[in-house]
Every structure is written in structure tokens, then in C-alpha cells.
Amino acid sequence: MRQLSAVRQRSEDYERASLSSWATLALDTKGRERAEDPDPLRTAFQQDRDRILRCDAFGRLADKTQTFLPAGGGRPASRDRVRLTHALEVAQVGRTIARALRLNEDLVEAIALGHDLGHTPFAGAGEEALSVFTDEPFRHHEQSVRVVEVLERSGAGLNLTWEVREGILHHPWIMPPPSTPEGQAVRVANRITTATSDLADALAWGIVAHGDVPAAVLAVLGQRQGEWIAALVADVVTTSLDAPEVAFSPRVEATHTALREFLAERVHARPAARERGDRAIHVLRSLVVHALETPQALPAPARPDDPPVVRVLDEVAGMTDGRALEEFSRLFVPPSSPTG
């Protein structure tokens, strides 16, 4: 065991010798909620990454839609981007930024892979659906933290380090920036991946034409998706070299904002997208109401003091798109009549 622990110590020594002075070292973690002996081979952030990869919620991301983009050109719904591919894309972009800035890639990867673990089925419509049952809007980043702290491992949680949990909580733009540069790198990578993927998919679906994209956006980012990502990443790296914060330059920040506004107006606010989202909202709210009206079927609480509505929202938010549709069909769709 002593020989194996030397492997982890070499990794920790390599971090201290090679990473930027702004980077977060695994040896300097603020720790876990429950103390553990160090792993003999892996640093604390490497452990966190592996725990997230193996947890139940991560596997379910393969059947959770990332963004609803109803077809204008007839591409099949099976081509919808899912949360799992999105998480992998964010991790890849985040690690590219981290390596260029000499930040801790293991911490970036752990945050990126875990940032959407609490997301509902059916993209953003799921958050809207569940928000009517809560005093405050249902937010996937808060649910992601609940997943890793409470819901996984039958209520024990994954016992992740503070830095990973804080990065997950603060990854959306509505939150204050993460305190670590690695969390900030994931936050920027998420913005890069979401905007460029939505635009690429909207073009492929025929929802918008290339000529519809604001010329000022293409002038800065280029003509193709690979160019868009490369331009955004290069700007982040150039702006953030030898700096304590990871961010876009003001010029590219304004370009990214213009792109998001274009997507919001021309893609996400389309009547067809709203109609599809309304159907998803109906499915999820029906499942929640039915569960609350049949307390004998409520799932076991993750914590003894969880009220029924929290138990139900944990259950429904954790469903995949497919399971939600199956449950809705089982509960509310009459079986077909036999034909003679």
C-alpha cells in the first residue's frame, strides 16, 4: 500500500511543479463532508471524476434531451442531442482550456461530467414543469448538487470534494462565478458548447439558414462549427493567460451574447418548440400530481425529513425521457381495444 500511495503522491507533486499558480491543487482541496483516507493511486479530484462516471444519474443522461429542436427539414427526433453527449463535449472543451492555461484538468473534468446530473427530462421544459410545485424555481444545478450529496448511493451521496460541488452549483450564468479557475473554465466551456451546438443543430434541422445568422457573429467566429469553437476557445485562452479568472474578451463576450439572443428568438421561441415543450410539461406535471395523490406509491425518502413533494420531484427529475413517457402512458393512456 505504501508503494501505491507513492503513485498518488507523484501525481500531486507533478501538479505542484507544473500547474499555474492560479490552479487548484488536489492536495489543497477543502475536503469532503465526510473524512476519508486518501486513495493510494488517484488524487482527490480523480476520485471524484470516477465516482461521477460510475453513478446512476450519469448513465441516465444518455436518455435526457439536451435541447428541443423540432425539425424544419425532416431530420428524425432520434438525432436530438442528449445530456450525456453535451457533458462529454463540455469536458473536452473545458480540458482544452485547462491544459492551455495549466489548470487542473482532473477538477475540470469532474465538474463538467457532473454539472447536469440533476437535469430533468425534456430539456428546459422539465424545469418549467416542476417549478409550479416549489416555492422557488426548480433549478437543475441545485438538483445536481442534491444528486451528488444526497440521492446517489441510496442516500449516502458520492461524498465529493468541496471544489467539485461548488463548481457544479455555480456553472450556470445565473449564479455568481465559481471560486476556482477550473470551475470558471467549465462555466465558459458550457456556454461555448451550448451555443455552438444549438446553432449547428438548428442549421442541420433546417430551422434557420446560414444566411440568417447575424453577419457580425460569423465575422468574429467563422463559418463552421469547428471554427466557432476554436475561435471561442482561443479567445478565452488569450484573455485568461496568466490571470486569476477565466473569461471571454469583451468583444467576444458581446458576440456570444448576440448569438444567444439570435438562438432564443429564432430557434427556442418558435411556436413548434413551444408546442413540444408544452406537451413535455403536461407529461411531467401529470406524473407529479398523480404521485402526490397516491401517497402509498411514494418513493422512499432520501432523508427521513424529506416532505412528499421533495420525494416526488427527486423521482420525476431523475427520470429519463423514455421512462417519463412510459409512466405517463401506463397511467393515463387507455390500452388499445383488441381487434376481432
Image: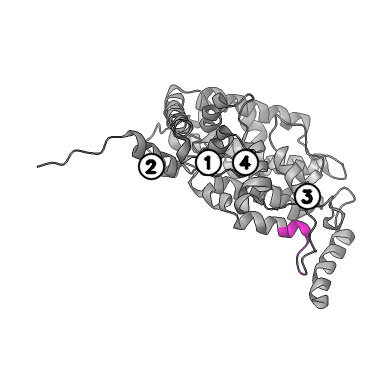
Which of disc 3 and disc 2 is earlier in sequence?
Answer: 3
Q: Nearer the viewer, residue 98 or 174?
A: 174
Mark 4: few/some/many CA within 10 Å (<14, 14-19, 20+): many
| Residue furthest left as drawn | 340
Q: Amino acid at mark 4?
A: Thr
- Under tag 4, what secondary structure? helix
**Which residue was labeled with disc 4?**
193
Which of disc 1 and disc 2 is earlier in sequence?
Answer: 1
**For the magenta stretch, what is the residue range?**
40-47
| Residue for point 55% across, 24% down | 132
- Under tag 3, what secondary structure? loop
Distance Cα–Cα, label 2 vs label 4:
30 Å
Distance Cα–Cα, label 4 vs label 1:
28 Å
The reply to whether callout 2 and callout 1 are in contact (CB within 8 Å) is no
The label nearer to you, 2 versus 3, is 3
**Which residue was labeled with disc 2?**
326
Q: Amino acid at mark 2?
A: Glu
**Which residue was labeled with disc 3?**
33
51 vs 123, left or right, is right
| Residue for point 63% across, 38% down | 143
Distance Cα–Cα, label 2 vs label 3:
37 Å
Which of disc 4 and disc 2 is earlier in sequence?
Answer: 4
Distance Cα–Cα, label 3 vs label 1:
24 Å
Q: Quadrant of the C terminus?
A: top left
Residue 71 horizontal/vertical position (percent): 41, 33
- Under tag 2, what secondary structure? helix
Q: How many marks?
A: 4
